Image (spheres, grey):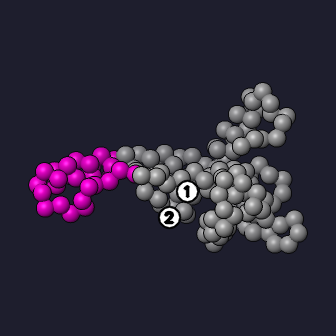
Amino acid sequence: MKKDSKLSSVLHVLLHMAHSDRPLTSDELSGYLQTNPVVVRRTLAGLRELGYVEAVKGPGGGWTLDCDLAQVTLRDIYDAVGSPGVFAMGHREENPQCLVEQAVNGALDQAFREAEALLIRRLSGVTLADLSADFNRRYQAHPRRKAPHAH
């Protein structure tokens, strides 16, 4: 089963925008993610409606951040991208008739709820500014920091 990387991908492009001194095009952002520009535009359009990003039209245009990084949490972005499922794991059957499977589902439900609640709490405590600061620390410590950031 393929992992849902939408949250990670959106955070990736938001951080690139945060560290750019100019608007970034959908083509540029899609290159960072090795995906199609249409996927980037569709996702960022939803973030634009929520006030996190802005689309600048015309020559030299592209996507820019339109929010205070210190006020936006990873939970905010998680919610903005549709609260993707935390786990790729799930029940074999959602409404089983088998009592054994009901017991298994009951045990897994509790574990999944607890793990998801922990993750959501953690996402709520990390801002985009925290991510940006972490990137800055990593960049400063990198031996080839004078070279363009490679992907």
- Amino acid type, label 2: Gly
Q: Quadrant of residue 42?
A: bottom right
Task: State the SS at label 2.
Answer: loop
Residue 52 makes an appearance in the image:
no
Which SS class for mark 1?
helix
Q: Residue at position x 46%, y 52% from top?
A: 2
Residue under the image location 53 percent in, 53 percent down: 5
Query: How many residues crowd around disc 2 within 10 Å: few (fewer than 14), some, or many (20 or more)?
Result: few
Q: Position of residue 7 (x, y in %)?
A: 55, 54
Report the front residue among 57 and 88: 88
Q: Is residue 11 left or right of residue 117?
A: right
Specify the amino acid type for callout 1. Lys
Residue position marked by numbered label 1 in the rendering: 6
> Does the segment drawn in magenta span residue 104?
yes
The mark nearer the N terminus, 1 or 2, is 1
**Residue, disc 2:** 82
Residue located at (47% from left, 51% from top): 3
Report if the CB atoms under discs 1 and 2 are less than 8 Å apart: yes
| Residue 116 seen by the camera | yes
Q: Which residues are magenta?
A: 88-114
Residue 34 drawn at (x, y percent)? 66, 53
Q: Is residue 143 above or below residue 55?
A: above
Q: Nearer the viewer, residue 31 or 44?
A: 31
Horizontal relation, residue 37 to residue 103: left or right: right
Residue at 80% across, 52% down: 20
Position in image of residue 10 (x %, y %) = 62, 56
Residue 118: percent from left, percent from top: 41, 45
The C terminus appears in which quarter of the rendering?
top right
